[in-house]
Image (cartoon, coloured by chain):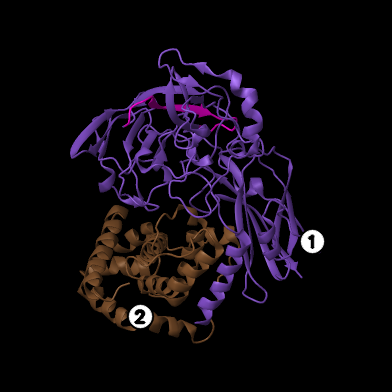
Chain colours: A brown, B purple
Amino acid sequence: MPDDTTPLGAPLTTPDGFVALYRREAELVLRFCTRRVLDAETGVDLCAETFAQAFRSRRSFRGATQAEARAWLLTIARRQVARYLKRGALDRRAREALGIVTPVLQEGEAEEIERLAGLAPLRAALAEELARLGGDQREALRLRVVEEQPYPEVARSLGVTEATARARVSRGLRTLAASLELRWEGERP
Amino acid sequence: MRILDELEREIERVAHAAGEARPRRRWWRSGALLVLAPLLAGTVAVAATTGILSGEPVSSDPHAPRDPNAGIGVNAGPGKLLAVRAADPAGGPEWGLRLVKTSRGLGCLQVGRVVDGRLGRLGQDGAFGNDGKFHELGPEILETSSECQQPDGAGNVFFAMTSIGQPASADPASCAVRPRGEDKRPACPRGSLRDVFYGLLGPEAAAITYREGGKTVRQAVERPAGAYLVVRATDPDRRDVGWWSPSVTPSWVESIEFRDGTVCRPDERPRRHGRHECPLKGYVKPRLDIATRAELATPITVRVGTAREKPYPEMDRKSLERMEWQRRVTISFRARRAADARSFYKLTAEIPGRPPNCGVGLGSPIARDIAAGETVTETLWVAHRCSGTMTIRIGYEQQTAPSQMPFHGDGPPNAKVGTARVRIP
């Protein structure tokens, strides 16, 4: 891992500089994304889109060290994950614009990525934290996140207004995120 | 890990095909300036009130002519120099804004220094050979689409730009903000960099407040466009300089005050597409006759080429040599609805798969005026070695709310025109 001052070497605007960034950080980004969506295949998609977006905006990167490049990349990855979690759909625009093909997982690779990302303990932690949530929030999360129902459907199932359904999901996610933040401390990203 | 290795090959391919990304070059920075300089020497004049000499006006790049019916179009008229001004921290001519409407109906904001009621750039920080003169910026100099936005239904433009580390000359390409080995431009003196915040908040905005020097500053916006402009010296220790970001809400402000007495604090607003956005008060949703699939559906014709070609002659030789042989795929369809800057066709093409058959994912708006009944023809290039079934989708997007930049929709098109599948051998 680079310290705060390890220089970048070739700038990201050069092919060699950008490929070197990928080689240094790809595994980290894959782990970062996978841990946040709890799914290896989605993690690969988000990782690929993160690098595609980073490539498209490489001219805007103004840092000079490996640590800055990593922070910049993780910011892009974080946005990708947030967008995915909000919309429930993967963004492919940068890959489409560049013509980047996302590799497909072969047998056993999902498990390998899940091991890399430490998903098993994370899932256990999630289940535990989910159990601690109030029944209303848990059910709202189950309908919205697990069953991927649109908010009007969630509201109908819960017998509440759409605004209330949104609030329950939002509060539930915030509570979960806060609990998991505490558990992840020291083992991020 | 195999999957990361495969993705690495894709990244390598794309990176090498793109070659080295260089800062924008201006034709007048090259030998052309030397040829034109003696001819233009006689045009120097002295501004009436400031005493600052005027040099030749800023010229547009003749190698990149704009199409009035495509992209953002060209300026339609002289535009309007807005009354809003901001002092430069080092003194000299104030900063100002001009709103220019384009032939495709977009509103674009030009920012620069104002001398005798004219907007322009200063010959300093490497610009115009540091001649110390004022160079007028014409309304036709629209350099990037990121300065433009779709107007609302009442013709108001909502726009917010943050530009960090811009040369005080107001010429963004005059010097290297972060000098690098390959950049031949002079380095911008750190003391002459500016953070420039400007935009249009619409007819309902009254003021913005922001922090400066430990105090809250309130700036009344210029009505009716809701224009604001703030210029500060860039923090000399700031490292992430030389970037700009268009939006519709100035997320850096403390608050936006509206005429109805309400206040929006961007920091307290939920993020939308990664940004804190305030409601666009006064935004009039454009009236669009939303197209249905039945109105648009039409057959798509696809012709798959067999020749091996290299289609980008403007690429440098090294990158061209590295580039794989490409295959031409020509797509055409009859546009049943007309297209303009607000309602436009969008094309995506995809070959699923992975090496050695290599998948392809392409997508872009067809950002040009199209008449109803016109046959639209687009060309795609795919690596010649790629094979598989290509799926081409044509959609029709109608924007009723501004996206971050023109033609950058946040989701899929609202209606489908058609889908075609062809076999790439």
Where is residue A139, by image quadrant? bottom left
Question: What subunit carries mark 1?
Answer: B
Packing grade of label 1 (10 A; few <14, some 14-19, many >=20) is some
Q: Can you tell which mark lies on residue B305?
A: 1
Mark 1–mark 2 Cα distance, whole angstroms, equals 46 Å
Question: What subunit carries mark 2?
Answer: A
Instruction: State the extent of the magenta-drawn residues as a range.
Output: B90-107
Mark 1 vs 2: CB contact within 8 A: no
Q: What residue is rendered at 26% in x and 74% in y?
A: A184
In the rendered view of the protein, which quadrant contains the C terminus of chain A? Answer: bottom left
Q: Which residue is mark 2?
A: A119
Q: What residue is rendered at 51% in x and 62% in y?
A: A52
Where is residue B35, by image quadrant? top right
Say above or below: B127 vs B310. Answer: above
Q: What residue is rendered at 54% in x and 83% in y?
A: A106
Relative to B338, B4 lies left or right: left
* Viewer-nearest residue: A34 or A2: A2
Is B52 contained in the magenta span? no
- In percent of width and height, residue B331 lies at 73, 54
- Amino acid at the residue labelled 1: Gly
Packing grade of label 2 (10 A; few <14, some 14-19, many >=20) is many
